[in-house]
């Protein structure tokens, strides 16, 4: 039975001409579309996108995992995977207290931290881990930084670190880099046998992700490493449920895999490989500032006598076109450097080009494409002023095992990684001149040594900033090295990946995973504004 209102509507509709009905239908359609559009805009403007649990992310890496362990990693790939599986002591710390003299640090753990096998993380695990680092048989890359650092158990959840000298960056450096390993799995084994255990490719950590499986091809090449979110993670379970690493032999294969949709993201130490093989599908490019810089370090003990002249070193530095290097080598994705820190300004605008005429130089260069290109560009700059430059190309392995160990170079193009605190002592103090020290220029200056020592024991931020400016100025003025640039770290991902902190400073490549628990590929909308972190 038709209702009166419907009868009335039909009478009105039938009374209209065909043209009038078409106009009415159009008006109704416009009104409907406008209402839907407005409703959608209202919903989008009045609600907020927030992370949601679920989804999969596939990260591509050049290299192979060998022994996934944060204190004895064999490869950079091991280090990267370890970042997701093992938590740092800084993250585990409910509280950190330092003594007034800066030599004693007490760290108390949260009470709800567990290894992936269900055992509770305790102070004993921390003490054990530091003991392994101190053991020379471990060959841990952390051993140098933990020399002179003793640790003792205070209670089940508290440890105390004792330092020989105060160190203002102990929390940011040591506690952040220390990722404990489970004592109950390794305590009965000699350190030299650790790599023989199944925990190399099936590690047990306390981090946001835990291992599910790994896959090899017929030749033994590990193709993938699969992880899943640790639902018992002591802060909150990661938003991305499944995380997979896929491994490749070189950068070009990595980029091709992304273009084919086989991976969702990858990192590059510089932007240089993207010039050879560009990305052709939709992507987000995260250019992350790096704390590393590259320079040509001058070994004045065996270099030509002329390099002992400040005027010659100033001319060599002034002749380098840093802005052109940044554009040609990195497509603009780097910062020119004129000293050991970014605060050093260009003091080489005036120099005597005649001072390097007829000078013959041997420049040792690691066989890395962006460093080779850099060296070739600098060779052109210097030879344009009458010098002769011989490029000595060596593999990175030879550089590390022979050239640096024996200081067998006149000049070497190499990089330093300086952490956020800008503690330069390891790179420029006189005591660090010889292997395994990192003073590649064999730089000696007693006043600079004193400033470097004072800097690392000064807790006042303003005083420390003044000291750093003095240190940077002194080293820059002496020109023990020709400082070149600090390249950005490049992180390419699909646009669906969100939560990446683009303001993060990268010390090492695995630092891109520092906030991995906050990444997400799925989201939902809510009327409640998210609380800013």
Image (spheres, helix red, strand yellow):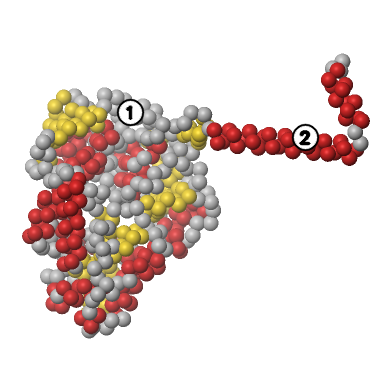
Q: Is residue 529 visible?
A: yes
Q: Are marks 2 and 1 in contact (CB under 8 Å)?
A: no
Q: Determine the residue positioned at 39% across, 30% down.
A: 237
Q: Determine the residue positioned at 67% across, 34% down.
A: 36
x then y, percent, for residue 529 = 47, 31
Q: From the image, which quarter does the N terminus lie in?
A: top right
x then y, percent, for residue 30 = 74, 38
Question: Which of 354 and 279 lies nearest the eye of the viewer?
Answer: 354
Vertical comparison of 260 with 171: above or below: below
Mark 1 Cα within 10 Å, few/some/many (few <14, many 20+)?
some
Q: From the image, which quarter does the C terminus lie in?
A: top left
Question: Which of 71 and 441 lies nearest the eye of the viewer?
Answer: 441
Vertical comparison of 50 with 249: above or below: above
Q: Determine the residue positioned at 29% across, 44% down.
A: 67
Q: On the image, which quarter does residue 233 sit in?
A: top left
Q: Can residue 193 be seen in this view?
A: no
Q: On the image, which quarter does residue 8 sit in?
A: top right
Give the label on residue 163, or none.
none
Rounded to the nearest whole Å, what is the CA distance between mark 2 and mark 1? 55 Å
Label 2 vs 1, first from the N-terminus: 2
Residue position for label 1: 234
Left or right for 163, reference 184 = left
Mark 2 Cα within 10 Å, few/some/many (few <14, many 20+)?
few
Q: On the image, which quarter does residue 434 sit in?
A: bottom left
Left or right for 241, reference 307 = right
Could you tell me which secondary element the residue under label 1 belongs to? Answer: loop
Residue position for label 2: 28
Could you tell me which secondary element the residue under label 2 belongs to? Answer: helix
Q: Determine the residue positioned at 88% across, 21% down.
A: 7
């Amino acid at each position: 039975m038709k209702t009166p209102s419907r009868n009335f509507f039909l009478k009105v509709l039938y009374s209209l001409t065909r043209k009038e009905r078409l106009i009415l239908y159009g008006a109704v359609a416009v009104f409907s579309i406008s209402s839907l559009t407005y409703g959608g805009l209202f919903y989008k403007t009045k609600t907020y996108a927030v992370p949601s649990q679920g989804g999969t992310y596939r990260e591509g890496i050049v290299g192979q995992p060998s022994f996934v362990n944060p204190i004895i990693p064999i490869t950079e790939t091991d280090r990267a995977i370890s970042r997701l599986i093992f938590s740092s002591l800084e993250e585990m710390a409910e509280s950190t207290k330092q003594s007034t003299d800066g030599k004693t640090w007490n760290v108390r753990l949260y009470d709800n931290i567990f290894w992936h096998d269900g055992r509770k993380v305790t102070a004993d695990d921390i003490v054990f881990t530091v003991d392994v680092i101190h053991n020379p048989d471990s060959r841990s890359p952390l051993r140098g930084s933990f020399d002179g650092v003793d640790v003792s158990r205070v209670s089940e959840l508290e440890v105390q670190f004792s330092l020989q000298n105060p160190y203002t960056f102990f929390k940011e450096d040591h506690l952040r880099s220390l990722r404990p390993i489970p004592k109950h799995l390794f305590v009965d084994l000699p350190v030299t046998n650790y790599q023989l255990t199944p925990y190399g490719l099936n590690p047990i950590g306390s981090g946001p992700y835990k291992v599910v499986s790994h896959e090899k091809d017929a030749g033994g090449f590990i193709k993938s490493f699969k992880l899943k979110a640790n639902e018992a993670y002591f802060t909150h379970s990661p938003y991305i449920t499944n995380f997979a690493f896929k491994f490749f032999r070189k950068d070009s294969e990595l980029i091709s895999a992304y273009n084919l949709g086989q991976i969702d993201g990858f990192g590059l130490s510089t932007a240089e490989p993207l010039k050879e093989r560009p990305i052709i599908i939709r992507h987000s490019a995260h250019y992350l500032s790096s704390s590393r810089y590259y320079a040509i370090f001058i070994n004045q003990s065996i270099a030509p006598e002329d390099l002992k002249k400040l005027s010659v070193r100033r001319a060599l530095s002034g002749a380098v076109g840093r802005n052109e290097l940044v554009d040609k080598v990195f497509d603009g994705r780097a910062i020119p450097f004129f000293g050991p820190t970014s605060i050093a300004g260009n003091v080489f605008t005036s120099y005597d080009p005649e001072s390097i005429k007829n000078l013959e130089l041997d420049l040792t260069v690691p066989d890395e494409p962006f460093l080779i290109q850099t060296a070739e560009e600098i060779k052109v700059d210097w030879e344009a002023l009458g010098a002769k430059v011989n490029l000595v190309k060596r593999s990175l392995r030879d550089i590390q095992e022979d050239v640096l160990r024996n200081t067998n170079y006149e000049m070497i193009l190499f990089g330093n990684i300086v952490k956020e605190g800008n503690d330069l002592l390891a790179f420029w103090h006189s005591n660090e001149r010889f292997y395994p020290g990192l003073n590649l220029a064999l730089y000696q200056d007693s006043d600079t040594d004193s400033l470097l020592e004072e800097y690392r024991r000064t807790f006042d931020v303003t005083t420390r900033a003044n000291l750093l400016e003095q240190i940077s100025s002194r080293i820059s003025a002496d020109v023990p090295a020709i400082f070149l640039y600090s390249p950005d770290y490049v992180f390419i991902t699909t646009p669906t990946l969100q939560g990446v902190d683009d303001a993060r400073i990268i010390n090492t490549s695995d630092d891109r995973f520092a906030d991995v628990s906050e990444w997400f590929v799925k989201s939902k909308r809510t009327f409640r504004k998210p609380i800013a972190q």
